[in-house]
């Protein structure tokens, strides 16, 4: 798109009360807007990036046979009383509100209970199992403090999948499948090498649950890494055992990290409380075995910014960047503008998403904006480059620029050439 | 997809307290689940259909240069006090909640105020105008009564676009563009011939605003139609004038209807209150002219069901049906199952979305489910049809079935052949 038409402008400074790097950069670059502590709105660049993350996660969930649903935020007291989670002392992050007739409602912090209620209509026999439902849905959590930008919001988009299985074996197989699906997701969005499968305490139904933790200096968590096995344990586990749970020998190294995903055995915690049962093949009525699998989509975007940024701005991975190419016009020569516009059309004709900085601004301001926004490839067009039949191409992560003949990328093959830089 | 894997099952009856046709059919067919009065969750078929409606509206908004945003639901008191809409007496559908420190928050019923606040960061000069921002966002409205299914929810998905223009002329041109965009949307989703551009009272800033009203027996509204001009006026207008506002001669005929969209001149109502100004070309600081343009996405889905349904179930238009083809296997012959599965793969290979009813159920049950769910084309495969090298094809809207040679649709050309039926 033409940058002159993008309604957001970059900012020199984030709001004074913003202390997190992720929100500071995303606000300055025009991806998000701070409504209040822990509550952010998405601006056009933010919608583009978050949609790409969402689509990557959606495709992964469809691949493991997840079926997409969208549950309500407003929640009835009676459903949550059945599982003993209505009480603010038990679940301490409720936002509650009331209907005009005085009926108290809650805003969903998570969706185990309402989805279990829905499944009572559809799961009756072993033939109805296994099944997997997931959603991308706004969660509301009344956090006491909220100083981590979009890493810990009071309102945030979450992908949550819930599995319903007939026995431990079927559940275990799916749980293992989800571990792999999550690894693939974190690799695809560009933080695979920073992200560790982390053993956490499993609750009543299994020895372990698992977190996916991304190592970064600004993390709120501490994990203990086995470099050899590429896994980690969290604080709960390190208290019980100080060696790697996989190789059982390596000493573990402490690192700060951000939890970007978790997978959890729920056992029959909710199917017992809400009476979700099925008739087994051998004719016995039994509770459904459940699991839950969460990824905070906004938190994931924030983590990527924490990990992939420098003093100048963000470095988006190609897979989730709002645009692949930032095309920058320098100078006021009309012929240069015309030819740059032709290149813009030619790149778009190749299916490439281009942000074309056609604004009347100094080169320095355009380069600073480009570094802040963080699009992977920058192509600069000026009188000087065109005089040689060239454009200047630079990746956001490298300092060196390359001169490329304009003809080599103008109408075809641009992606291949860019990716060799 | 294989219907045996779809986790939802159809139901004979809707919940006893459900009185609206739209929710009754959508619940029975497995598109939605009733959480409580006015609050519905979307099941997999519902997500598919709503996503298609959303995508049609999104493309229309992108075509008129809308930029997609996503604003928070949680709202600060101070923003809404500026426009005098925080008070429950003024805006009577607020849901309110509180932070742990006692700070009162609201759940957005609409987003004029917060978007105007955001635009204060980005609109400074006439060069920043016009601009258009839109979103698909959940609105919360504390309705006293909620008996119209998904037509009037307490929590519902809405597309709202807001326009920011430098003068009346620029605003008027965009307002006219949006009228056309809305007409196109309602035609694309299959209710164009039932939907009337309806003149409504304009408020302080213009003579008229406009609603898009879909005529149906179950409508909550009454409009007054000019058959000749294909426009209508609403109750407010008919009190002032009883002839068509376009031809100024025709007598108007009363019809019940559902409001599926509205476009509204906001003038400087919000830019004055929240101080959204810009420096004009002639050097004068002036308020931005605003407009708002809403379509309730869930309500639109409900309206389509009200208009396009019969005693057996729903009749989805092709553009928004969860699947294009309902492929139904009859009988237990393994060879028939194998050949039907080949046809399923062959249709999918043509890019056609197919729901394959591979379940072990009687033919009558499968046909009843198919009529209820409402996929446009039904293809039946049985020992009898295969013996002739045929399949039986029927559209949901017609009673007559056709026998077609299986070869004509198995690997190519199926869409063209189906659309001639």
Image (cartoon, coloured by chain):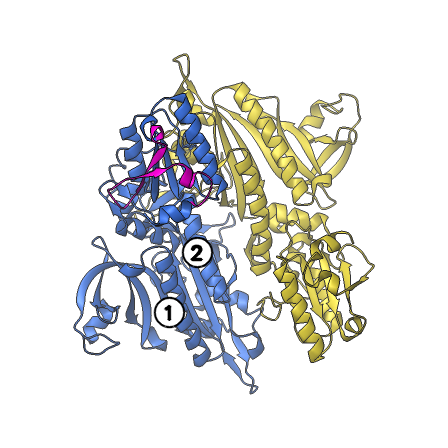
Chain colours: A yellow, B blue
Mark nearer the N terminus (1 vs 2): 2
Q: Where's residue A51, x and y in %?
A: 56, 51
Q: Where's residue B86, x and y in %?
A: 41, 62
Mark 1 or mark 2, whichever is nearer to me? 2
- Chain ID of residue with mark 1: B
Q: Which mark is residue B11?
A: none
Q: Disc 1 on helix, strand or loop? A: strand
- Mark 1 and mark 2 on one chain: yes
On the image, which quarter does residue A212 sit in? top right
Whether residue B408 is in magenta: the answer is: yes
Is A220 positioned to the left or the right of B197 in the image?
right
The N terminus of chain A lies in quadrant: bottom right
Is A148 positioned to the left or the right of B50 in the image?
right
At 47% from the left and 34% from the top, the residue drawn is A112
Q: Which of B390 and A213 is in front in this view?
A: B390
Q: Which mark is residue B56?
A: 2
Whether residue A127 is in magenta: the answer is: no
Q: How crowded is mark 1: few (under 14 residues within 10 Å), some or many (20 or more)?
A: many
Is A374 positioned to the left or the right of B256 in the image?
right
Q: Residues within 10 Å of mark 2 (few under 14, many from 20)?
A: some
Check disc 1 and report the residue beneath it.
B264
Q: Nearer the viewer, residue A92 or A341?
A: A341
Q: Where's residue A41, x and y in %?
A: 54, 57
Q: Where's residue A357, x and y in %?
A: 66, 68
Is A192 positioned to the left or the right of A126 in the image?
right
On the image, which quarter does residue A323 sit in? bottom right
Residues drawn in magenta: B386-413
Q: Disc 2 on helix, strand or loop? A: helix
């Amino acid at each position: 798109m033409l940058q002159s038409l993008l309604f957001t402008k970059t900012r020199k400074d984030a709001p004074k009360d913003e202390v997190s790097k992720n929100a500071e950069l995303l606000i300055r670059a025009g991806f998000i807007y701070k409504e209040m502590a822990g509550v952010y709105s998405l601006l056009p660049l933010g919608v583009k990036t978050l949609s790409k993350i969402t689509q990557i996660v959606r495709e992964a969930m469809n691949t493991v046979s997840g079926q997409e649903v969208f549950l309500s935020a407003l929640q009835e007291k009676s459903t949550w009383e059945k599982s003993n989670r209505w009480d603010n002392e038990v679940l301490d992050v409720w936002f509650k509100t009331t209907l005009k007739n005085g009926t108290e409602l809650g805003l969903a912090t998570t969706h185990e209970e309402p989805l279990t209620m829905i499944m009572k209509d559809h799961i009756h026999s072993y033939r109805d199992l296994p099944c997997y439902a997931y959603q991308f849905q706004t969660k509301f959590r009344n956090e006491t403090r909220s100083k981590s930008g979009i890493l810990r919001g009071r309102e945030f988009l979450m992908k949550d999948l819930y599995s319903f299985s007939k026995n431990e074996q079927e559940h275990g197989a799916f749980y293992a499948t989800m571990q792999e699906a999550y690894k693939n997701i974190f690799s695809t969005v560009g933080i695979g090498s920073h992200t560790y499968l982390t053993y956490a305490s499993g609750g009543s139904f299994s020895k372990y649950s698992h977190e996916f933790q991304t190592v970064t200096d600004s993390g709120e968590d501490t994990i203990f890494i086995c470099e050899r096995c590429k896994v980690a344990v969290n604080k709960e586990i390190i208290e019980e055992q100080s060696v790697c749970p996989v190789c059982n020998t390596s000493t573990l190294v402490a690192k700060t990290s951000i939890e970007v995903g978790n997978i959890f055995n729920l056992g029959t915690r909710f199917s017992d409380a809400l009476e979700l049962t099925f008739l087994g093949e051998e004719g016995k009525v039994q509770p459904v075995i459940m699991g839950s699998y969460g990824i905070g989509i906004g938190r994931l975007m924030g983590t990527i910014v924490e990990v992939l940024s420098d003093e100048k701005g963000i470095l988006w991975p190609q897979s989730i960047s709002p645009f692949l190419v930032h095309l920058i016009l320098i100078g006021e020569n009309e012929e240069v503008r015309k030819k740059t516009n032709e290149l813009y059309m030619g790149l778009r004709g190749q299916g490439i998403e281009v942000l074309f900085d056609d604004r009347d601004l100094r080169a320095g301001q355009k380069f600073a904006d480009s570094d802040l926004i963080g699009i992977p490839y920058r192509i600069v067009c000026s009188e000087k480059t065109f005089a040689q039949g060239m454009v200047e191409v630079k990746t956001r992560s490298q300092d060196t620029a390359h001169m490329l003949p304009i003809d080599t990328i103008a109408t075809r093959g641009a992606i291949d050439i860019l990716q060799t830089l």
